[in-house]
Amino acid sequence: LKRSERAVSIAFNPLQRYIAVGTRDGTVAMWKFVGDYVSDTKEKAKNATAAEDWIALPTVGMASAVVNITWGPGQGVLAAGGEYGCVMLSETILHRHLNEGAAAIQVNSDSVMVETSAGNKSNVGCGINVKGLVVDDMHLVVWNGKEAQCYGIENEDGECTQKSDFPSSARSIALRKDTLFMATDNRLLITNLQGVQRMSVSFTEAEGLPTLLDLNGNFLAVTTDTGTIKLFDVSRKEPKPLGSSGSFVDPMTNESLGVIRAISVNADGTRLSILSDRIHGQLKIRDPDSRLHVYDADRDIVDSYDFKPTGRVPVSAFWDSKEPKLLGCETRLSSGAGSATKSGGEAKEESKDDLVGLIAEPKNPVERVHASASSVPVEIITMFVDADHGIKLQDSFPLEKPMEALVGINVPRLYFVGREGGEDDPGAKSTGVNMPTLASTPTLASTVMRDFVGLEDVETTTKQALLDFSYNLTIGNMDEAYRAVKLIKNVGVWENMANMCVKTKRLDVAEVCLGNMGHARGAAAVREAKKEPEVEAAIAAVAIQLGLLDDAIRLYKECGRYDLLNKLYQGQGEWEKSIEIANNEDRIHLKTTHHQYAKYLESIGDTAGAIRNFERADTYKTEVPRMLFDQQRIDDLEDYIFQGNDTELLKWWAGYCESLGHFEKARRYYSRAGDDLSLVRVACHNREMTTAAEIVKDSQSKSAAYHLARQLEAMGEVQEAISFFSQSGCYNHAIRLSKAYGLDSELMSFALKSRPSSMIDCAQYFEQKGEYEKAVQLYQKGGDQSKALSLCFRVGKEGKHGDAMFDVLQGLAEDIGGEDGDVSSMSAADLERCADFFISNGQHAKAVELLYKKGKKYDYAIDLCNDHKVTITEEMAEGLTPPKTDDAVDQERRNETLKRLAKACKKQGNYHLACKKYTQAGDRLKAMKCLLKSGDTKNIIFYAKQSRNTEIFILSANYLQSLDWHNDSEIMKNIITFYTKAKAFEQLASFYDACSQVEIDEYRDYEKALGALKEASKNIAKATTASATTIAANLQSRIYVLDKFVNARKSMKSDPSTAEQICLGLLNQPGTEVEESIRVGDCYALLIEYYHNAKLYQEAFDLMEQMRDRGIILNPYLEKDMMEDIYVGLGKPLPANFDGKGAGRGSPVGSEDEIDDEIDDEIGEELDESIADSDEEESSRK
């Protein structure tokens, strides 16, 4: 619609999914819904229809503005009301029907085109709106639901003449010779051609009303509106039912598969193809089913093949008139890419929809916007159907212009509706209610089936053999396929089958076909093709031999073998395509392709093009000179080389000129190419030595210098030859000449620059001449350290060159013992002699390094470290560690060495390194002792946790007690954990005892102190030592005293008299149990404070005197104000030494320090004893 048009009325047809709109301008526009139906309400809300879900149909113009539009009760009837009345717009389905003798195609609402098997055509004007038609070789019958007409077909010219016209309400009609089968009401009427009833077959209410009929040969199929299926044999006078009736239901769920809209029966009446619609919602919207159903009468089961994965729906299906297994099907894109199917009462469905007076159907269906470019609107599929294998696809191909829709199948041809004349105008708009004229005329068209190309007219036996071959090939039964055709002698048949094998990619069958064809070259191609890993590539090779080049190209593209496709294009002479393929897909053969193209251009005389492609192929350096030489175009070749300025070509051309004796030209080209060696060679050839020397000097070319040196040597110029040999880096030649002519002064410098073998050779030369210093130096530089040392020791022992050799030996030893020294060639004896040399000269570190790096003298090296206080570093310690071994003896020896190394590290104070080596030796206890001496608390805790050793746990806990454990909860936690894991309950009880004492002395927290003593008592009860009983008894007595004192403190406010009695009892208790359990001063202080508060100053004063008598200092326990109150209350003067002095168990002064000192002493003594014991054990072992 145009933007200026305004819609005034809208109507929707749910059965066929049409929406119609009328406008004020008198236009009726319609669209058809082709999207997927969504039944779920929530999904509908989420997925509203889009523009691409609707196809716009041609519009209709009316004489006045549209007031109202509505759809009629039937299908395809639209009423449009305007200012001048109402117009009825009806829909017509263009039907078609095929019989062996003739075909009928509906042209418009009231005319039919009939074409006989002889090719004669006739147009029949029926005078009624045709709702269905059926044809055979003698008659044409059309009907509209109220009336039926019968026409006779003349065999000579195909003209049709009306024979009868009778009223009929039949929904569907089938024709066999002079008999009509009509589906009317609840009966199947059987009449003659004049409509006179002969008999009838009634259908029960449960079976439903017959709606669709189809006849193939002697078999008639009937389906009803309830999905009942009946098959009849009509070859006799009365129809004979074939078995019981079937149902259009799912064999698994027994639920209906939908509403049947088209049927087709096969040639032997055993199968019925069915197309159906699914019904959705209360509006009963019809949605075409994407499945093709086949009812099998023998099994009474409906098989289905779903086209939904391919995005297509079947619109028509036809069986072959002779072969009962062969079925043809037309499919279209399910979402608007093809014309949607119409539901109707005709078995052979329409190819397109047409609204009479409304729609001029375009020849090509409207494609959906979202359809992929590779999807074809209409596709024809052939398939085989049997009980054993179900529905098997045999072939498929797109339906292209001018063919539009499938009409039927009659082996070896498929028949279609075609168009003659001009194109349709899909946008045509009618100006009234009359149907617009079609721009082209429909006609019957056909195409040969793939398996019968070139074999259209074979005899019946061969035709059946080919059908059997195709069937067995489809189901994969190769033995039966070969057996079906092995007796055929027709070469054309085998060639056609070979071509078919290319389509089906059956290389094994193609080999058989080529053999029967006598195609020797093709058979050889098959044998060669089997070497290819891709089946497509092998089949493509066969296709080339058969001349199917397009198929070969397609197959090569499918398998990605663009290299072979490149060769194919080259063989065809399509060089542009070949280069394009190589450039885009086959880059590895791009240069080869250009080279072959250049050879081709050379063969046709295109020299310039050949040169360009040789350059692109990077073969121009050899091919262009060859080509131009072959063509005797020497001047053009020189121009090409000069302009190209390619170094290799310039050298080649210079060499060519030199070979002709043109030395000046050769020099120019050698100079331009930068070939200094060739320039020197030409100069030497001409005895221009000065010029050659200048070239070498300017270019600094080693190869040129070497060539000049060889020439000078040949001329006897030894000194200059040696100089140029040295300049070229060929020191072996300089050494050779220096030795030959006794030039020793220069020989040493050349030898030091030469390779090691030359150094050794020169060293031997100097050794023979008695120049030992030079010999030793060269032996060392040449890598023969042993020889250098031996020579030094030998010469030193003989007393020759004493001081000089000592300096040489010292320098040699320093180099060997240095960081980069190489000792790989030294013997063990030489190694020890060098070590002795280092030791004698005070270089102990170097001696140690030399011993363990080369000699593996680990013990000796460790002794040197101990004796001469050589600091052992981390790197040195790793070097002094022997490698691991699986041998038990060697492993024991390794452990002893590690222990010696650890002891050496411990003596040097490197406790961490000693710990590491003791651990490697398996002595974790000594490792922990070393770690304890380091004082590394974090690592001590970590090592103890990792070791899980009782003694280590105890040592670690003892060490941790020496730290500030009271203020560090983590340390206290580890102490308790370690003692617990070690089951050292006596030590743990002692620790809890210490905790109790700290709570009393530092914080006067007797409650916590009591708790700690109880924990100590629990743990000492677990101990099994001899002293555990005594300790437990002591703890119990202390707990008793402490518990009484704690109760006294608690009851001082609530029951002071009881608290007073408890305190006095504790103070008067004989023995030392009280002083060991509590601070006596705290007990006195509790009583004095009570007396002070009770104004009993005398009693308080007496207790203060008792404290002085027992040596307890008053100030830490009593407040000064309280003491003054007591003296004042008694009227006594304060003493001069008011603070008083004394000492006793209860004194808090220095208590914490004394405890810490005591713990430190215990741990220190225990550690020293353990270390001393271990040292004694080691001494005893030694």
Image (tube, rainbow, N blue to C red):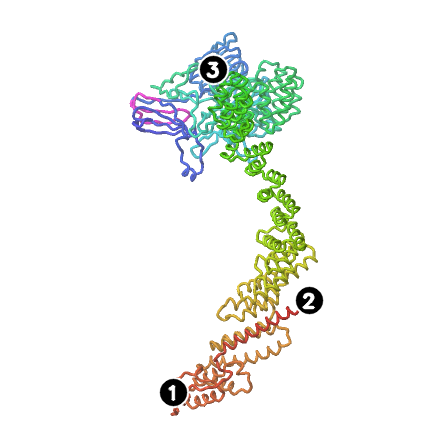
At which x and y percent is residue 156? 52, 7
Residue that badge 2 annotates: 1181
The magenta segment is 60-83
Judge whether 88 appears above or below 1106 on screen: above
Q: Name the residue under label 3.
A: 443
Give SS at disc 2: helix
Residue at 35%, 19% in the rendered image: 430
Q: How far apart are marks 3 and 2 (CA)?
A: 119 Å
Quadrant assignment for the N terminus: top left
Q: Mark 1 points at which residue?
A: 1125
In depth, the one of 740 and 887 nearer the eye is: 740
Circle 2 Cα neighbour tier, 10 Å, few/some/many (<14 / 14–19 / ≥20): few
Give the residue at x 38% y 17%.
436
Cα separation, mark 1 vs mark 3, equals 140 Å
* Residue 297 placement (x, y as % from top left): 59, 27
Residue type pointed to by label 3: Thr
